[in-house]
């Protein structure tokens, strides 16, 4: 497939296409028009065509998109055709919730190891994965071909843990700690802050409330 620079905005929409197409594929749907997909995804048909046109010609005039093909190709673009091996650092509330979520594995994200400093947690299992001492981190990462580190620890601890992960050749960090990590250019960091999403919701609720009261003339 033709390779060109794709904007991060388009990339950030691909997982959603991938999810919907996966569901359509599971129902046996073979092809879909941008119009039909637009109705399901609540995105305009022109946005869909514009997004998918970034990847050579996925669709055909008068035919639409082949669901299975599009699903597979978007999966490849997202790197989901390869397995990723993860270590999760911090087996507290958030870490355990992530480790217990099975769907990541269906997408090829395998949590191979869980680490913590709490002696009461070390040796316990989260979904059959033992919690290990941080002393084992470097040797485990190297031996198990780990490419992603997940940080579910307090922010001060996250800075140090990220340094250790980088020193053993990790490629990506999925960072839940509320801190911006300084890492070399070849290490990719994806920050996830649930509260950012909640604040966005709050903004939209406020804005909607204001526009409604504006329309009705109420204060
Ligand atoms: P928690 O206190 O339940 O778990 C934290 C775990 O990290 C504990 O098991 C602790 O022993 C371990 N830990 C502390 N220092 C460590 C170190 N140096 N190395 C390895 N393990 C270490 O806290 P919770 O609720 O699971 O939250 C974890 C972190 O994630 C917090 O910093 C919190 O602010 C953040 N968080 C972020 C969210 C987001 O959306 N980004 C949402 C919820 C929490």
Image (tube, rainbow, N blue to C red):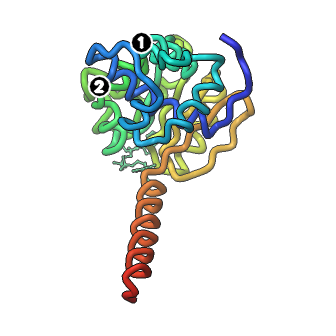
Q: Quadrant of residue 218?
A: bottom left
Between discs 2 and 1, the one toward the N terminus:
1
Q: Nearer the viewer, residue 185 or 156?
A: 185
200 shown above or below 109: below
125 shown above or below 175: above
Mark 1 C-beta to ligand 1 under 8 Å: no
Looking at this view, name the residue that lies furthest to the front.
62
Whole-percent x, y for residue 109 in the image: 43, 21
CB under 8 Å between callouts 2 and 1?
no
Q: Nearer the viewer, residue 15 or 159?
A: 15
Task: Nearest to the eye among marks 2 and 1: give it.
Answer: 1
Assign a secondary structure to mark 2. loop
Q: Quadrant of residue 122?
A: top left
Asked whether the viewer can see residue 77, the reply is: yes
Assign a secondary structure to mark 1. helix
- Residue on which the image places disc 2: 102
Q: Nearer the viewer, residue 205 or 180?
A: 205
The quadrant of the image that shows the N terminus is top right
Whole-percent x, y for residue 171 in the image: 62, 24
Whole-percent x, y for residue 139 in the image: 53, 17
- Residue on which the image places disc 1: 68
Res. 174 mark: none
Q: Residue at x 41, y 21 (%)?
A: 32
177 shown above or below 54: below
Q: Residue at x 53, y 25 (%)?
A: 148
Cα–Cα span, label 2 and label 1:
23 Å
Whole-percent x, y for residue 152 in the image: 44, 42
């Amino acid at each position: 497939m033709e390779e060109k620079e794709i904007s991060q905005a388009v990339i950030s929409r691909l997982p959603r296409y991938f999810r919907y197409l996966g569901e359509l594929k599971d129902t046996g749907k073979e092809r879909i028009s941008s119009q039909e997909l637009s109705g399901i995804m609540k995105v305009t048909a022109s946005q869909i065509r514009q997004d998918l046109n970034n990847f050579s010609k996925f669709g055909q005039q008068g035919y639409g998109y082949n669901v299975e093909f599009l699903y597979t190709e978007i999966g490849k673009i997202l790197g989901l055709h390869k397995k990723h091996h993860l270590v999760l650092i911090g087996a507290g509330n958030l870490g355990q919730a992530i480790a217990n979520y099975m769907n990541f594995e269906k997408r090829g994200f395998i949590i191979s190891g869980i680490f913590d400093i709490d002696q009461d947690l070390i040796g316990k299992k989260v979904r059959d994965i033992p919690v290990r001492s941080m002393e084992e981190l470097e040797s485990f990462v190297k031996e198990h071909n780990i490419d992603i580190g997940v940080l579910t620890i307090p922010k001060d601890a996250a800075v140090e843990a990220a340094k250790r992960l980088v020193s053993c050749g990790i490629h990506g960090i999925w960072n839940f700690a509320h801190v911006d990590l300084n890492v070399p250019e070849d290490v990719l960091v994806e920050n996830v802050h649930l509260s950012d999403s909640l604040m966005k919701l709050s903004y939209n609720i406020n804005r909607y409330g204001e526009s409604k009261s504006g329309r009705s003339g109420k204060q």
